[in-house]
Amino acid sequence: MSILITGGAGYIGSHTCIELLESGFDIVVVDNLCNSSREAMKRVEALTGKSIPFYEADIRNPEAMTEVFKAHQIEAVIHFAGLKAVGESTRIPRTYYDNNVTGTLKLVEVMEQFNVHHLVFSSSATVYGDPAIVPITEDMPTGATTNPYGRSKYIVEEMLKDISASDNKWNFTLLRYFNPVGSHESGQIGEDPKGIPNNLMPFIAQVAVGKREQLSVFGDDYDTKDGTGVRDYIHVVDLAQGHVAAVKTHQQDAGLHIYNLGSGTGSSVLEMLQAFEKSCGKSLPYSIQPRRPGDIAECYADPSFAEKALSWKASRTVETMTDDTWRWQSGNPNGYES
Ligand code: NAD
Ligand code: WQD
C-alpha cells in the first residue's frame, strides 16, 4: 500500500516525502512540475536511498490520475498540488480556482472511483483572514479571506466538509499551515521560488546571496512588538513531520479532522532579518516601505490541539530555520538549476 503525494516535487511536498519514507511509508508522487523541478525528486531519492514512482501529470486530468490509481494500491492521498501566490491569484483567479478547487474535486472523484477515502489537504492559516484575537484556535471563524488564493483554500475546506457530512466513509484531515520556512538540514532540498519571491524568508535568502539588492520591509507602523508584521514561522521539517503524525493518527479514522500546524510563536519581520544576519554572518540591507495591501498585523497559532491529538509539536527554533535556509541558499544560489 502506498500514499499518493500530489505536488510532491514542491517545497513542502518534497520535505514530506523524506519524512514519510523515513517513517517506513511507501509513496507515489504526482506533480505537473508547474512550480517545481524533477531534480527535487532526484535529491529526495539520493537522501533517502529509495526510489520513488513519479508521474508528471496534472491532478485535473482524470485519465492520467486513473492510470496512477490502477498502477498502485493507494491507501491515502496527501494533497499538496495547487497554486499558492497571493498576488498572482488576483490577476488570474480562474486559473487559481481551476487548479485548487476543480483540481481537488477531480482528485476526490478519482479517489471515490478507486474506493480510496483518506485525504490530507494542505490548507492555510489564510482561511482565518484577519483574526480578531491571537493565538488562533481551530474553532475561530473562517471565510473572511482577502484574495482568490485564500478563497480557493476556504472553498475547498467547505467542499470537503460537505462531502464528509454526506458520506461517513470519507476521512479528511485539513491542515492549516502557518508560515513554512527553512530547509532540510542536508542543504540539498529547499524552497526554490520562480521569479521574484513573494514571501519573506526566500526574499531575505536571495538578498543574502546577492541576487536581490535589499529587503523591502512592508510597514513598520503596525501595532506589534517593533511595528513590523508578526507571523508564526514553522520549520518545513516540523511541518512535514506533522503530516506523518496526521496520517498515522487518522489512518483508520473516518470523519473530519482540522488542525493548525504552527509553532505557536510570533516573530516580526525585523526579528527574522536579524536571525538571518546571524546565520549568514553579514548585515543585510533593508528599507522600510509602505504596508503591503491585504497584509495583517499579527497571526500566530495556538498549536495545542495538534499537540494533544497528534502527539506532534514543532520544535525547531527560528535560528534553525535561518541556519538551514542559509545552508540551502548558499549551496544552491540558483535553486535546483545551480
Ligand atoms: P509548491 O508550489 O512548492 O508545491 C506545489 C506543487 O504542486 C508544485 O510542485 C507544483 O508543480 C504542483 N502542482 C500545482 N498544480 C498542480 C496540478 N494541477 N497538478 C499537479 N501538480 C500541480 O508549494 P508549497 O509551498 O510546497 O505548497 C504546497 C501546498 O501547501 C499548496 O497547496 C499550498 O497552497 C499550501 N500552503 C503553502 C503555504 C506556504 O507558505 N508555502 C502555506 C499554506 C498552505
Ligand atoms: C510575512 C511577513 C510581510 C515579504 C503568505 C500568504 C499565506 C501563506 C503564507 C499560503 C509579512 C513581510 C514579506 C517582503 C516583507 N501562503 N514581508 N517584505 O503574507 O504571512 O502569508 O504566505 O497559504 O496565505 O498570504 O507571508 O512571507 O509573504 O510575509 O516585509 O519582501 O513579511 O509584510 O508581515 P504572509 P509572507
Image (tube, grey):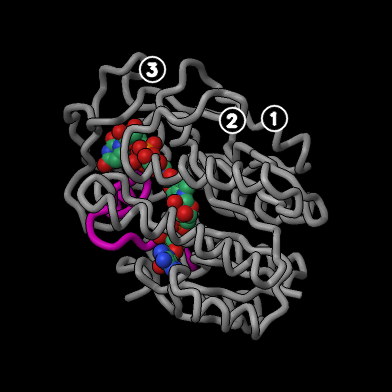
Q: Within 10 Å of the Cα at label 3, are there few (<14), some (14-19), or many (20+) other Cα atoms? A: some
Q: Within 10 Å of the Cα at label 2, are there few (<14), some (14-19), or many (20+) other Cα atoms? A: many
Where does the image place residue 11, in percent across and percent down from the top left?
46, 60
What kind of element bears circle 2? loop
Which residue in the protein does label 3 denote? 224
The tag earlier along the polypeptide, 1 or 2, is 2
Based on the displayed image, in which of its 4 quarters is residue 252 positioned?
bottom right
Identity of the residue drawn at 31% across and 45% down = 86
Q: Quadrant of ligand 1?
A: bottom left
The tag earlier along the polypeptide, 3 or 1, is 3
What kind of element bears circle 1? helix
Q: Measured along the vertical axis of the image, is residue 270 above or below residue 20? A: above
The tag earlier along the polypeptide, 3 or 2, is 3
Q: Was residue 317 drawn as part of the magenta stretch in this picture?
A: no
Check contact, mark 1 vs mark 2: CB within 8 A.
Answer: yes
Q: Measured along the vertical axis of the image, is residue 39 above or below residue 163? A: below
Please provide the residue range marked out in magenta.
188-208
Where does the image place residue 121, in percent across and percent down from the top left?
57, 52
Which residue in the protein does label 1 denote? 304
**Foreground of the two, 212 or 251:** 251
Where does the image place residue 155, in percent across and percent down from the top left?
46, 43
Check contact, mark 3 vs mark 1: CB within 8 A.
Answer: no
Q: Was residue 191 drawn as part of the magenta stretch in this picture?
A: yes
In this picture, residue 157 sits left or right of residue 291: right
Which residue in the protein does label 2 denote? 264
Q: Look at the image and tell me in which quarter the C terminus lies.
A: bottom left
CA separation in Å, label 3 and label 2? 16 Å
